[in-house]
Image: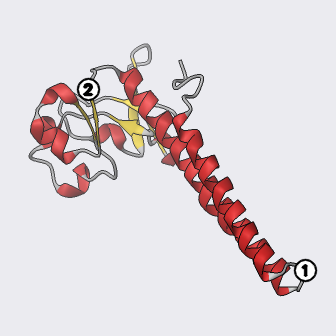
Amino acid sequence: MRNSFVGPTPAGTGSEVGRSTVVIIPSLGRKVVFGGPALLPRLAILDPELTVGLPPALTAATVGIAFGHGGDIPAEASGAVILESSLQKVDELLHIARRLRNIALQSALGGMALSVIGMLVAAAGYLPPVAGAITQEVIDVVVVVNALRVAIPPKTLTDY
């Protein structure tokens, strides 16, 4: 369930992003309740108009995504605006964000790790000051070149 997308319930209560769900089994005439953190979706697409009267604890979100044709208020309140009304664009947005995060982490952590190694080698006396400065400049160039990979479009941006 971790890779699931959910849409709003007809009542707009936000219950679709809870840790439990009720499944109706018509052949048995029963309702079964399932629960647990594995049921939490990665993304929930909700209509803000349906959640106006709900308490803030139910409507709080870390990231908001608005479709561009919905108006200025949802677009201003969201963290991202998608101009097309296609859920495939949401999937692309998630892939782009994950890729940017990975490249940024590689650049930052890789640059720091290489700098620390260079400082340790210099502290041990194996790297003279001028060579240490040149080595640091080379590390900086490598980090910038790695970050430039963001400009290269990936082969695919969706899971479909």
Q: Give the SS element for disc 1.
A: loop
Between 45 and 146, the one lying in front of the other is 146
Q: Which residue is mark 1?
A: 126
Please rate how many residues cluster around mark 2, counting C-alpha atoms within 10 Å: few if below 14, some from 14 to 19, many from 20.
few
Q: Position of residue 17 (x, y in %)?
A: 35, 41
Q: Quadrant of residue 33?
A: top left
x and y, in percent, of residue 155 in the image: 60, 23
Residue at the front extreme of this rendering:
130
Q: Position of residue 38 (x, y in %)?
A: 52, 43
Q: Are marks 2 and 1 in contact (CB under 8 Å)?
A: no
Q: Please state which of residues 47 and 64 is positioned toward the viewer in this rendering.
A: 64
Residue type at mark 2: give it. Leu
Image position of 47 with respect to 115: above or below:
above
Residue that appears at 80% across and 73% down? 131
Relative to residue 143, is residue 5 depicted above or below? above
At 60% from the left and 61% from the top, the residue drawn is: 108
What amino acid type should be assigned to the residue bearing mark 1?
Tyr
Q: Does the image show residue 141?
A: yes
Q: Is residue 155 left or right of residue 89?
A: right
Relative placement, left or right, of 3 versus 119 is: left
Specify the label residue 83 is tagged with: 2
Relative to the observer, which residue lies in front, 83 or 64?
83
Rounded to the nearest whole Å, what is the CA distance between mark 2 and mark 1? 56 Å
Asked if 105 appears above or below 44 in the picture, the reply is below
- Protein image colouring: secondary structure
The secondary element bearing badge 2 is classed as loop
- Going from N to C along the chain, the mark reached first, 2 or 1, is 2
Crowding at label 1, few (<14), some or many (≥20) Cα neighbours within 10 Å? Answer: few
